[in-house]
Image (tube, grey):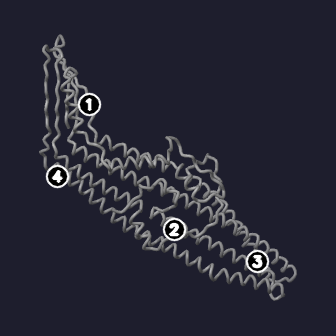
Amino acid sequence: MTRFPLSAAALPWLAAAFALASAGCASASREEQAARDQVRAAGARLHPAGGRADLPVLKADAPLADYLRFALLNHPAVEAAYADWRAAVLAIGPARALPDPRFTFEADVTNVLEQFMPGLMFDFMTPGKRAAMAREATAASGVARRNFVSAVLAAAAETQKAWIELAYVDEAIRLRKASVSTLDEAAGLAAASYTTSSGMASLDSQLRLINDLAQTRSQLDALGDRRAAVRARFKSSLGLLPGDADPPWPQAALQASALPDEDELWRRVQASNPGLGEMRAMVDMALAGVEAARRTGTPDFQLGGMVDLKMNPLLYRPLANVTLPIWREKIAATVAAARARQEAASARVNAGLLEMAAQLAQMLSMVRESDRMIGTIDGTVLPNLERIVASTEAGYQTGISGAAMIPETRLMALNLRLERAAALRDRETAATGLLLMTADIAPATAPLITGVRASAP
């Protein structure tokens, strides 16, 4: 560290100090300027004209993208991650700047003031050391930038998962209501059959239908409670507090989303996964830390000058000091520790790749299992049930079969559709996880993370 004290009476010294300080300033690097541009671009979308962004007007029939935009512009987790990123970018300038000048004062006093020596002190270190510190701070802002991208994608994924769950619960309630109606019809037909042709079989059928009806109504009540919980989750994912007004609840049917093949998904995971991006940014920060640690062996200079205002003529006292970084073991340990942090960060990237590979395989397995179940239901089981229903209705009209068989076969079809809805829900939840792994949740995230995505080196 360098001190450069100058008295108010020594204008030539002051001018020389400022010239030396200006010459030693480390200017902003291209990486620092790029970080400023990126955080400014994201801020322009989150806080246009320094205010709050206009939220989309939500409607019950609005597409998922509108709800996602609402969540990203309103969720406090996104705002917190942006503020942390902006703070990290703003910390780059102080890391490379000269320390603030300091006013100093010295006096000797016995019975009277014998000596009065003010001065002005400047602390500065070599430009190379300050540039290395700036690069480390810039790399730290890169970690904060990746954290912001992760926060944006996580908020979008949570909203999309809550949307999927809400659509499933709404569909399940609709199917369960249809099941209650069908069971009511079946119970009525069984009661009529029992009164016209008494027999234990008819009584058993009637009691079984009554039990099934009670159980289905209980399941319907449970689904109502579940919908209330899912709506609370969905509202929270939009960044709305419990006391805030409820948003219009979306009314959308679940549909299978298209996914790239496994090789393409793995390529996107390696290139764009937000978690891997954070790890790679930490490697960059560790590399910059190694360079900064090496600079600890560079000496720092202390220059100064004071003036005694009581003397006539004025007494000037120039000062000059230099640090002596002679403890080589200390310097070597500092560099070795920085290298160890770099190695740890690099190993975490490889560990992250292994974890991503396992997660990708697991989620793809869930998607494929759901696809097989949906394909079997759509291609074989449901068509066969529909043929059975048609055959039963035709048999009843011709007197071959009883009326009780019609609602029972319809109930089987309703239960099968509920299984299909559950399989589709599981598929889309897994697909959302895959899209999160590839930083491709929805187009609504693009305006906030364009230019700040994680990318493979």
Quadrant where the image shows the N terminus: top left
Q: Earlier in the sequence, mark 2 or mark 4?
A: 4
Q: CA distance from mark 1 to mark 4?
A: 32 Å
Tell me which amino acid carries mark 4.
Answer: Ala
Q: CA distance from mark 2 to mark 4?
A: 49 Å
Residue occupied by mark 2:
431
Q: Earlier in the sequence, mark 2 or mark 1?
A: 1
Task: Give the crowd class for mark 1: few <14, some 14-19, many >=20 residues within 10 Å.
Answer: some
Task: Give the crowd class for mark 2: few <14, some 14-19, many >=20 residues within 10 Å.
Answer: many
Seen in the picture, residue 163 relative to 105 is either above or below; the reply is below
Residue occupied by mark 1:
101
Q: Earlier in the sequence, mark 4 or mark 3?
A: 4
Question: Which label lies toward us, 2 or 1?
Answer: 1
Residue occupied by mark 3:
407
* Residue 15 pos. (x, y %): 21, 28
Could you tell whether 396 is left or right of 235 in the image? right
Q: CA distance from mark 4 to mark 3?
A: 82 Å
Disc 2, disc 4: CB below 8 Å? no
* Residue 347 pos. (x, y %): 30, 63
SS category of the residue bearing label 2: helix
Quadrant where the image shows the C terminus: bottom left
**Identity of the residue drawn at 17% across and 52% down:** 332
Seen in the picture, residue 434 relative to 13 is either above or below; the reply is below
Tell me which amino acid carries mark 3.
Answer: Pro
Seen in the picture, residue 22 relative to 354 is either above or below; the reply is above
Disc 3, disc 1: CB below 8 Å? no
* Residue 396 pos. (x, y %): 81, 84
Viewer-nearest residue: 280 or 169: 280
Question: Which label lies toward us, 2 or 4?
Answer: 2
